[in-house]
DNA sequence: TCGAAATCATTTGCACAGAAACAAGCTTGG
DNA sequence: CCAAGCTTGTTTCTGTGCAAATGATTTCGA
């Protein structure tokens, strides 16, 4: 008579990751309704690194070609980024922050920090740092 | 002269969560191509709890009404779950595992455990348990 | 130098994921 | 008992996210 192995969904890392992500997305959407988390990530990266080709940008924020295209299209529609042809390589589409996009990022970045803090709020300071460093090793 | 606050995307909990989730989804898809992680979560919950109404089931796996409907529809198309009218409440749609669905879950559950292990593999045993418990508190 | 291989962007198809609006059915307070 | 309010399920819309196929361009090796 062996005991059932008992696969507990609530203990699976994938399920817990999904739920934590859900909560984080909700906090972000409430704090910064103007853009989504992925859109904000793109603005942040462009702010850090400056203009880049669409594909380079995608790699820099861990989005595949099809995904980054959609995100860039929506950001362009919002007037937060602008695309231009690269004269040196005609396949490339250079993506850059517009002044509006740079301003939006500058104004919302404080709030984005608060979003991260609120997401981590149930943990103590040490635990927060520990969690992020453990997660970073699973990348 | 104050130093720039320096919002580092790579240190933000939301971004790290997204990247870890990406890696986990890739591991799962390679190990169990028959269904997705969300679909498997539904099978697991039905296996644990038995038949439920579609909305109940959605709450039990943290999916909103629109999402659980799509997932159930696709599982039904695969023949892994079946829906039936609830005679006691005509609004309700009861969702149950089919024999095929139960068998698929039984056969793949070992592999699903391995997926969780592989996702957590970069960490030591203690770290793994710690990570999951920290994450669980952010739910 | 020229053709194969690699890179870049796009498109299509599928699968979540949540918000909002709606219809139908159940429940309950007055 | 019955209207108001709640629950259940559906549809539509927007936004990720990945795989695979395609076409254009660039690069690199023989």
Image (tube, coloured by chain):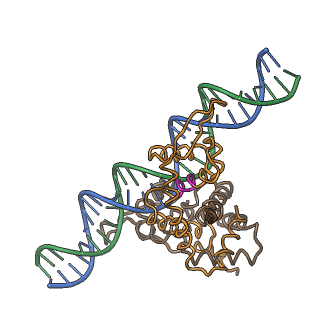
Chain colours: A brown, B orange, C green, D blue
User: Residue A87's x, y, as percent?
Assistant: 32, 69
Nearest the camera: A42 or A27? A27
At 46% from the left and 45% from the top, the residue drawn is: B79
User: Residue C20's x, y, as percent?
Assistant: 62, 39
Give the total number of marks visible in the rendering: 0
User: Residue B14's x, y, as percent?
Assistant: 61, 66
**Can you say which quadrant of the picture contains the N terminus of chain B?**
bottom right
Find residue B54 and report its image quarter.
top right
User: Residue B50's x, y, as percent?
Assistant: 62, 47
Question: Which span is picked out in magenta?
Answer: B37-43
Of helix, strand and loop, which mostly describes the magenta segment?
helix
At 53% from the left and 73% from the top, the residue drawn is: B118
State whether residue A36 appears in this view: yes
Nearest the camera: A27 or B66? B66
Find residue B5 and report its image quarter.
bottom right
With C8 as the anchor, is A29 left or right in this view? right
With C24 as the anchor, is C13 left or right in this view? left
At 57% from the left and 46% from the top, the residue drawn is: B68
Find residue A94 and report its image quarter.
bottom left
Nearest the camera: A40 or B97? B97
At 46% from the left and 70% from the top, the residue drawn is: A51
**Can you say which quadrant of the picture contains the C terminus of chain B?**
bottom right
Magenta-drawn stretch contains A80? no
Q: Is residue B69 above or below residue A111?
A: above
With A38 as the anchor, is A1 left or right in this view? right
State whether residue A42 appears in this view: no
């Amino acid at each position: 008579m062996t005991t059932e192995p008992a696969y507990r969904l609530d203990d699976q890392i994938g399920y817990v990751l999904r739920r934590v992500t859900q909560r984080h997305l909700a906090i972000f959407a409430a704090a910064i309704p103007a853009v989504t988390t992925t859109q904000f990530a793109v603005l942040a990266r462009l702010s850090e690194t400056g203009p880049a080709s669409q594909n380079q940008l995608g790699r820099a924020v861990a989005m595949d070609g099809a995904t980054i295209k959609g995100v860039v299209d929506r950001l362009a529609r919002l007037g937060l980024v602008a695309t231009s042809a690269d004269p040196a390589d005609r396949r490339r589409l250079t993506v850059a922050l517009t002044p509006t996009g740079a301003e939006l990022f500058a104004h919302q970045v404080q709030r984005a920090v608060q979003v991260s803090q609120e997401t981590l709020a149930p943990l103590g300071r040490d635990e927060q740092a520990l969690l992020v460093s453990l997660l970073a090793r699973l990348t």
